Every structure is written in C-alpha cells, then in structure tokens.
Image (cartoon, rainbow, N blue to C red):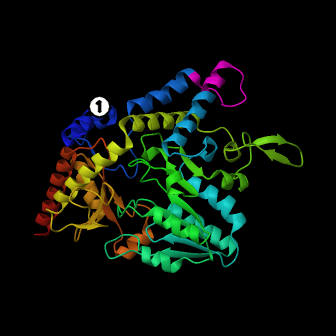
Amino acid sequence: MTIAQERTLAAKVRQDFPILHQEVNGKPLVYLDNAATSQKPLAVLNALRHYYERDNANVHRGAHTLSVRATEAYEGARDKVASFVNAASRQEIVFTRNASEAINLVAYTWGLNTLQPGDEIILSVMEHHSNIVPWQLIAQKTGAVLKHVNLTETGELDLEHFQQLISDKTKLVSVVHVSNTLGCINPVEEIIAIAHRHGAKVLIDACQSVPHMPIDVQAMDCDWLVASGHKMCAPTGIGFLYGKLDLLMAMPPFMGGGEMIAEVFLDHSTYAELPHKFEAGTPAIGEAISLGAAVDYLSNLGMDKIHAYEEELTAYLFKQLHGIPELKVYGPQPTEDGKGRAALASFTLPGLDSSDISALLDQEGVAIRSGHHCTQPLHRILGVSGTARASLYFYNSREDIDAFITALKDTIDFFGNIMD
C-alpha cells in the first residue's frame, strides 16, 4: 500500500469516529492525547449499545436466550483477544478492569506467594506508576529487593546496565514495551531472553504497544503481558492479562466471589478452571464485548498497516518539531522514515509550564496532555516536573500535526510578547 493510499485510508477511517467531528472553543478538534486514551469507532459504540439494548443479561450458567447470547459474545471477545496477541490458548486471556489491575493480579498472586527475602525485581526508571507501586508493595511484604535499569544518553533503556543488574537472584523483570513519555521502543525480546537465561520471569506492560503494532506473545516469549482496552479503541473499565498457561494454573485466585468458584462449602471452596479463576463477580460484560469489537476493527485495518502509517506520521511530526529551536523533546530521535520510536513527543519549552502550554493549545482546539504522565521518577531524572505530550493514532493526519505546530508556535509567540 502506497503512502497516498494510506492517507486515503486514514481519511476514510476518520469518519468512523464521531467524536472527532466537533469544535472545541470554536475551532475544529485536533485530538492528540491518544497515549492517555483513544477514541472509539462506531463499530465499538454500536457493540456496546447492542448488548444493552438486545442481550443484557448476566453471563455463564444462565439457560435463557439473553444469557446465552451474552455469554457467547463475552467469551467470543476472549477468543478475539487471544488471536490478536497470538496466545496459545484462550485460557491464557484474563479480563481485568485495566492494565493496572492486571499487574496487581500478578503481584498479589504470583509475587506474594513466590518472592522471598533477598530475591530481586528489576524494573526500569521509565515505568508507569502502575508498574512501580505494586512491586514496591510486594517488596515491602516479602523482603524482595527492587532494582532499576537506567537510561542511555539518548533516552532509551540501557541494555548494558540491565545485563549488569540481572543475576541468579533476579526472580522478576517487569518492563514497559513502549514508554508513554520517552516514546522509546524497548528491546523486549532480548530482555526476555536474557531474563530467562537467569531463571527470571518477565512481565511486559504493553499498553502503548498493543494498540499500535503487531504483538505476538508466543514469539516474544513473555510470561505475562498486560494491556488496557481504552487505549485500543475499546471502552474504559476493560483490559486484559495474558499469562502462560502453566503459570496461571499455579497462581492462586486474586479475589474471591461468584464466577471464580467450582464448589463452595461452609469451610472451604474449590475454584473454577482458567481463566474464570481470576474473574470474580459479574464482569464488565458490555465492555468486554466492545473490546472484542475493537479488536475486530483494528484487525480489519491491519496492525502492520497501522504501525507503518504511524511511522510516517512520526517522521512528519519530528520534522515539524525540529523547526522550533526552543523546544526540547525527550527520548530517542526517529529515523528519517519515522522508525525507532512511538508516535508521540513529550517536550518542554523554556520558562513555560506544561499545563500552560496545554491550556493555550486547548483554546485552539488542540488536545494534548501535560504533567508527569504517571512517570514521576522518570521526570525527576529528566530534571523537569512535567512535560507536554502530543500523541498520535491512526486516525490522525498531517493536517492535525500542522494545526498542532501552528498552535504551538502561536503559544510561543504569545508568551514571548508577554515577556517582552
């Protein structure tokens, strides 16, 4: 597919997202906050509405027609997610509220019951708080030791430092695939291979990669992988945990209640087969079904095509950013064709707070994120309290980038005139 065809595809896809066709502060909306949450296509919105209008019933064990239809759609969504990440079995996909819950599930089942005093957990300094705080809590409870991989001078994970840190004491490596602040794409396959040679398990935070590029958990050989639906065109309140079957089978339940049991007696209980052992209570049925619809939507577009188009957008974005000398962009630079990093840019301007930048861009209809992006330790290392971040998705265009750059230059001029 040529670049011109890809642009035509992007223009066509944009019609599927009704929220994008509005004005904000009298200006056409330019939505560049996709690393925080993505917008939802009509196919997903219609799937959610269809469930509540036609099939609303609790899943599993219901004999009536609505329950059967709801169960088929809910479990069908699991099959779609399993195929999307190439899991070996549908039993390896556990629905959670989000990636944070998925990480906590692993932490409080595997981590709390496996780690011993002196065992080591390796994270990186660029991790999202969701992949830091649970392991801090588990380390406090078990006596395990946390270690952190540093950055290179170019703002990437220092693989050499990782190799220095890891040892036979390392029991877990938990790292992000794509940094939501630096935009770097970490060499997770190499990290996993090194960790496994030392007998360590590996959890991958794939929130910023699953929506943007093809993911194959079997080829990656990770032990666990987590993602959030709301970043991949699905609703909020739904995410998933992938785990290798033998690991999930050995892990105790996370929460107790309905759905996760086989039999309950007054003094003990037996537990359901995977994956239901980890899905206590009535699940987010409509949201899971809508996640399945989002997977269908992304799959029909083609994750390889989405990734290639976003690389083109990345190249164009950074070319425009380079024309603003006052700007400091964090993380590695992409190649001329946009490869080597994600389609996002976190940046600062001298003398300007990131929240002021975001607020002024909002007046021009441009939505970006400001703050620490749930990476406070990383921002301390970078020496800034916060950054402004523009993040792209496949429904964005060069015209969106142009509008962002124009608004950003106007913001710089505005503050320059005030200071003068």
Q: Could you tell me the amino acid type at mark 1? A: Gln
Q: Quadrant of residue 116?
A: bottom right
Q: Quadrant of residue 387?
A: bottom left
Residue 343, image x, y percentages? 31, 54
Q: Is residue 299 above or below residue 179?
A: above
Q: Is residue 325 above or below residue 357?
A: below
Q: Residue at x 64, y 43 (%)?
A: 91
Can residue 128 be seen at all in this image of the molecule? no
Q: Residue at x 72, y 64 (%)?
A: 113
Q: Residue at x 57, y 67 (%)?
A: 196
Crowdedness near tag 1: few (<14), some (14–19) or many (≥20) residues, C-alpha within 10 Å:
some
| Count of all numbered marks drawn on residues in the image | 1
Taking the image as shown, residue 401 lies to the left or right of residue 301, namely: left
Seen from the viewer's position, the closer of residues 174 and 354 is 174
Residue 388, image x, y percentages? 30, 61
Locate the C terminus by quadrant.
bottom left
Locate the N terminus by quadrant.
top left
Q: Is residue 365 within the magenta segment?
A: no
Seen from the viewer's position, the closer of residues 268 and 251 is 251
Q: Quadrant of residue 23?
A: top left
Q: Is residue 37 above or below residue 376?
A: above
Which stretch did the figure color magenta?
55-70
Disc 1 target residue: 15
Residue 304, image x, y percentages? 35, 45
